[in-house]
Image: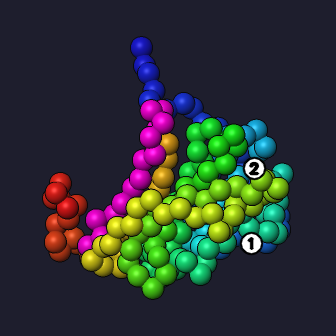
Amino acid sequence: AFSHAQPTVDFNEMNPTGNALVNPVDIANAGDGSGRLFIVEKRGTIRIIKDSAVLPDTFLDIRNLVMNSGERGLLGMAFHPQYPDSRYVYVNYVKNGTIITTISRFTKDPNNPNKLLKSSEVIYITQAGEETNHKAGDLAFGPDGYLYITMGDGGGSYGPNDHAQDVTS
């Protein structure tokens, strides 16, 4: 007998129409039955694909908050497990002009299901690294309801300070 930790996933080819995506780094489904796909663009935007078309407006645009350089940028997102009843969306980005990773939450606009309120940002965690690279960005809610956050070791090429090997750093 065999068992699998993950369910089998079938992929269907899609050729979206509309505006081109710019440096996509993550994709999410809200789990709300709408069929929308949310594409995280490293530059600091989240775009929506609906019915194989990239919608013209952004779900979130925080380009002025995001450092889009090298391995830095808007790197991940996760919908609250009870979305859309809970209107929260969590993001992982590197703060503009810095090497500081930021984990924050935005709230969906009650009048527009395709928009997050930029003014609703609540910052939960900031983590400074020592270098501009070795950033990670995925966010995911586990079956336990906890938000899991990936962080890179924040140290330069080849890990000169062995942060990834040191459980205290």
Q: Position of residue 43 (x, y in %)?
A: 59, 76
Can you tell which mark lies on residue 134?
none
Please state if 33 lies on the left or on the right of 150 as rendered: right
Q: Amino acid at mark 1?
A: Ala
Answer above or below: position of 55 versus 30. Answer: below
Magenta segment, prevailing SS (helix, strand or loop): loop
Q: Read off the residue under disc 1.
A: 20
Please state if 65 lies on the left or on the right of 4 as rendered: right
Q: Quadrant of residue 7?
A: top right
Can you tell which mark lies on residue 36?
2
Q: Secondary structure at mark 2?
A: loop
The residue stretch that appears in magenta:
142-155
Please state if 113 lies on the left or on the right of 154 as rendered: right
Q: Position of residue 9 (x, y in %)?
A: 60, 36
Q: Is residue 74 magenta?
A: no
Q: Secondary structure at mark 1?
A: loop
User: Quarter holding the N terminus?
Assistant: top left
Residue at the (65%, 69%) spot, across then down = 119
Residue at the (56%, 51%) spot, across then down = 78
Residue at the (48%, 63%) spot, across then down = 123
